[in-house]
Amino acid sequence: MNKEYFFGDVTLLITHYNRSQSLEHLLLSFEALGCRFGDIVVSDDGSKPGHIDYLLQLQKKHEFRLITTPQNRGLGNNINKGQDAVQTPLTLYVQEDFTPTAVFPESFTHALDIMREKPENDVVRFYAYFEYPYLKNPRNGYYEMDFKLWKPGYRKFYAYSDHPHLRRSNFFEKFGRYIEGRKGDFTEYSMMMSFLKNHGKAYFYKDYTGLFVQKNSESEPSTMSRENWRQTDRFPVKQIRDLYRHLKFNFDYLT
């Protein structure tokens, strides 16, 4: 029999848009790992009627509060209204297309220890597309993220990400709310800069794809789209893009 984990002071906050089967898979995955939370909030961004009907059916099988909106209002609004509904001290934020791995529950207890023992720490990050370049003070696989403006490279600016992470539920008091009415990339970038300018502190799980897996099925593909130039690694586009980001990130941080 699997070990049971109850995280009573944590709300699982899931943002959702037109991917109800992915959401069901995420909920079932946490249950299969024996993970229970003080509360679960699903924040929907104006999904199609068929997906809303599916969410209502899921509510009968899984205990969660559903926060809806009559029309799509974008990433910023979806996270804001979901976070507003959280009533516990800590929030585990996960998008609906992620799945926790078998090692998540035990490792998550270590992340909770960090947040409880270090009140100055704002976030513990569980997933990324690349390893944060400057890490220190290892602790059970987690490392403190060390942002210094003078250190080389633009990737040091990615101290915050909206990928799965644990944060304090009063996050908005220190960093402000997510910008609404803009594209998702701009919303994420703005919060990234706010996190740095307000001296945010975070820990990073070094095996950064070890606790969650991102899954996009053919029936429910990703709803986030980006221009090709942001993704390609072809020379010289990558070099020009990296230089642009280095200059822009430094300028935006200093202004």
Image: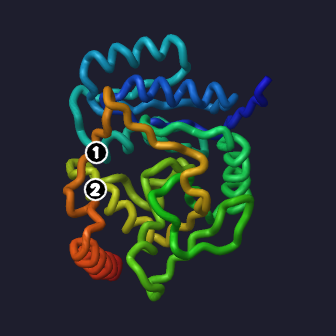
Q: Is residue 248 among what the camera can see?
A: no
Q: Residue 117 at x, y = what percent?
A: 74, 59
Q: Please give the name of the residue rendered at 51% of the width and 68% of the height, measured from the top-left corner.
A: 132
Q: Secondary structure at mark 1?
A: loop
Q: With 200 as the anchor, is 103 left or right in this view?
A: right
Look at mark 1 in the image and give the residue it sits on: 224
Name the N-terminal-most of marks 2 and 1.
Answer: 2
Three-letter residue code for mark 2: Asp
Residue sitting nearer the eye, 66 or 245: 245
Quadrant of the image containing the N terminus: top right
Look at mark 2 in the image and give the residue it sits on: 185
Three-letter residue code for mark 1: Met
Q: Residue 225 at x, y = what percent?
A: 24, 47
State which quadrant residue 143 falls in. bottom right
- Position of 98 relative to 127 (above/below): above
Q: Which mark is residue 199?
A: none
Quadrant of the image containing the C terminus: bottom left
Color style of the picture: rainbow
* Residue found at the far front of this picture: 235
- Position of 224 relative to 146 (above/below): above
- Of circles 2 and 1, which is in front? 1
Q: With 201 as the anchor, is 107 left or right in this view?
A: right
Q: Please give the name of the residue rendered at 50% of the width and 11% of the height, measured from the top-left corner.
A: 60
Residue sitting nearer the eye, 89 or 63: 63
Q: Please give the name of the residue rendered at 25% of the width and 62% of the height, measured from the top-left corner.
A: 230
